[in-house]
Amino acid sequence: MINRILSKIGLIILKKSYFKKNYKLKNVFSPLDQLFYKTLHPDFFFVQIGANDGVSFDPIFDLVTSEKVKGIAIEPVPDIFSNLVANYRNYPNVKLLNVAIHKDQKEMKLYRVDPQKKGYPDWTRGTPSFNKSHHKLSKIPESDIVELIVDCISLEELIETHSIKKIDLLQIDTEGYDFEIIKMIDFSKINPTIISFEHGMRQGIMQMSQFVECQNLLFQNDYNIIILENDAIAYKLNK
């Protein structure tokens, strides 16, 4: 039924496993890809919060680089940020910031899997979190977690400092802080056309009650929502 409803606006939902190979079949795109191309225009602008190295497990790198759109990618962890800089070196339209987004603090502790520890899968490299307990969800022992202090700015500061007038795509992946960032959006001033974020309810990253609260906030601001296995996409196609 969901696919039938979405097909009326030209969207389809595909299982994540469909995209395990490193290619896409002609004319077949994920829901985020489809919304990106429906929204794409010459002045398209994105903000990515929690950009990791720009490539690993990144849903928008191929879109950004193939279409050479403008935007800002944010990653607070210094060594990961260095890789982000390297991966975006040929794309001057993308501004890179080595900070975290936080509602009211200028510095925060981030907890990450110790990069010196061997034997962990690649995805653990991209899971630094403000919440130390976040890593318990992945059954990573506390002895393998290290902390670092990172600089922070608020979403409002980001928007004001960089004179952002509109956001076509807001991509968020902050290991448990996504809803807090969505709550920072002043919808009376700026309405991202697409907001893509991680809910991770199956893993316990976001509780069902939090997701319902997040969903209601987005509904109140006239967003439609597509819920995927680990992520959700809120969008406005009538802007």
Image (cartoon, grey):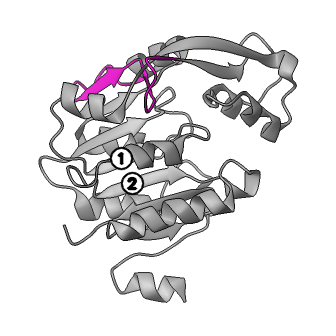
Give yes or no for residue 128 being in the magenta stretch: no
Instruction: Write the residue at 43% across / 17% down.
Output: 106
Residue 207's place in the image compared with 45, above or below, is below
Residue hosting label 2 = 195
**Secondary structure mostly seen in the magenta stretch:** loop
| First to last magenta residue range | 87-107
Residue 119 falls left or right of residue 15 = right
Q: Amino acid at mark 2?
A: Ile
Q: Secondary structure at mark 1?
A: strand
Count the numbered circles shown. 2
Residue hosting label 1 = 170
Q: Is residue 114 visible?
A: no
Residue 121 falls left or right of residue 23 = right
Give the quarter of the figure containing the N terminus: bottom right
Instruction: Write the residue at 29% across / 48% down.
Output: 186
Q: Position of residue 31 (x, y in %)?
A: 44, 65
Instruction: Write the residue at 43% across / 48% down.
Output: 183
Q: Position of residue 11 (x, y in %)?
A: 40, 75
